[in-house]
Amino acid sequence: MNDLRDSNFIKANNARYGWHPMAHPGDMQANPPRIVTAAEGVEVIDIDGHRLLDAVGGLWNVSLGHSAPAVKQAMIDQIERLAFYNTFRGTTHDRVIELSVALREFFAPEGMERAFYTSGGSDSIDTALRLARQYQRIKGQPERTRFFSLKYGYHGTHFGGASINGSNKFRRQYEPMLPGCHHLPAPYPYRNEFGTDDPAAIAQGIAARFEADIAFYGADTIAAFVMEPVLGSGGVIVPHETLMPMMRDICTRNGILLIADEVICAFGRTGSESGSRLWGVQPDMMATAKALTNGFFPLGATLVNGTIAEAFETASGADGTISHGYTNSGHPVGAAAALVTLEEVQKQGVVANAKARGEQLLAALERLKEKHDIVGDVRGKGLMAALELVSDRAAKTPLGKGAVQAMFDAAYEDGVMLRTSGNNIIISPCLVIERADIDRLEAGLDTGLKAAA
Ligand code: PLP
């Protein structure tokens, strides 16, 4: 941090010439973002030298913590030996071969057989959508083109993923999006259209809606259903345990592929190796990214099961050729980072830690709800959680932007880096977080909630 060439120069140019994702450029210039210049363990360090507990975990992705020496070393070694080579038809490299074996082993319970590499989550989802359509064509059903997904789901920002996103805000400025994308209600007990807060009844309602839509449009027009096992960016919405198994069953009966968007859930976040495993489901495809490399390299993997693998591998000519890919598909530095990350996740017992610390976190959030009227709802699974803030509990009126910002600022001053999304505080710390860190997080949230009230 002290090797910054000139912190005044950095501050003066903050948000001036670089635009930020999911932000209004004018707002960003008026309220410049906090500048992080270093990180260590589960903490980040800002430009003024303040240390903060990182309750964001990078952006759901830094699971092993910001230091992760084994991952860094593997990346350095890889850069020295082979910093880049492509994996397009004709060439490959050793790391990507090893990683494909490792991923197949890691996701054996989910039945994943093959990996297609991407540069991140949006790529992984769009790859899954394209492979789903191609698979249906290989099976002689080219008219199966529709996609179904859940409201409040988030599937990235490419045209395909944004078309199936469950919030209109990702689409409306960019219309027309992909046609034939349909959105089922979210498994969201706090706000839903089913007139109940019973998660099991809501799951039944969603499944019934899916069946009705399949009957209406015809199963033979639907390629795939996409869902996050636990909905992340939409506000950490945890479905009832029956939802994903029911959707699996409906998909199977109707020849519809089930694509699990595991970009957040995979590699331990939910307290299981994957969100699909958490709910005891074998999807047809899994989209992964983020914690695959501990967030240290932009790499994703779209994984497919044996049935899909065989269909492609035995299809003739152009039918089975994957006319899709990225320069960075299987980047050697990303593959090296991923290999070590997978090893460390297992060696360090990260998944069990996420489960145990997640239970502690949820109990802390429930205490905060007891204490602060502006906490309308508390949700979480493993180390992904949210506080939904309201100005009126009975009316569930979302808390205003100014108060949410006041909470962020007060927690920041107290040494806790939060992330806000609308009226939600999203919590996704590194998965190696310890008991005392959760206490510190609770204290920071408490300070923030007092400031926001
Ligand atoms: N899918 C899910 C569930 C995500 O949470 C995200 C990003 O947050 C994406 C897809 C898109 O990933 P990326 O931002 O790496 O493109």
Image (cartoon, rainbow, N blue to C red):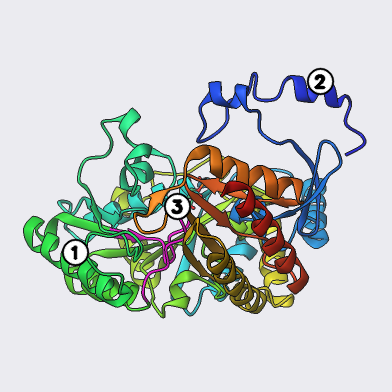
Which three-letter amino acid code belongs to the residue tagged 3? Answer: Val
Q: Nearer the viewer, residue 230 or 226?
A: 230
Q: Residues within 10 Å of mark 2 (few under 14, many from 20)?
A: few
Q: Principal SS element in the magenta part?
A: loop
Task: Tell me: residue 282, above or below residue 409.
Answer: below
Number of numbered discs visible in the structure rendering? 3
| Label disc, if present, on residue 390 of the rendered structure | 3
Q: Amino acid at mark 2?
A: Phe
The reply to whether residue 119 is visible in this rendering is: no
Determine whether the residue tagged by mark 1 lies in a helix, strand or loop. helix
Residue that label 1 marks: 210
Q: Residue 57 at what x, y percent from top left?
A: 66, 55
User: Picture coordinates of residue 262 (x, y %)?
Assistant: 47, 62
Q: Marks 3 and 1: which is nearer the front?
A: 3
Q: Earlier in the sequence, mark 3 or mark 2?
A: 2
Disc 2 vs disc 1: Cβ atoms closer than 8 Å? no
Q: CA distance from mark 3 to mark 2?
A: 39 Å
Of helix, strand and loop, which one carries label 3? Answer: strand
Contact? badges 3 and 2 (CB < 8 Å) = no
Region of the chain picked out in magenta, as a range: 225-240
**Residue situated furthest right in the rendering:** 2
Q: Measured from the top left, where is residue 140 in percent x and y? A: 17, 58
> Seen in the image, is 263 located left or right of residue 322?
right
Identified at 41% across, 58% down, the residue is 393
| Residue 353 in magenta stretch | no
Measure the alpha-carbon separation of dots 3 and 1: 31 Å
Q: Is residue 104 above or below residue 221?
A: below
> Does the magenta run of residues contain 231?
yes
Front in this rendered view, residue 251 or 350: 350
Residue identifier under label 2: 9
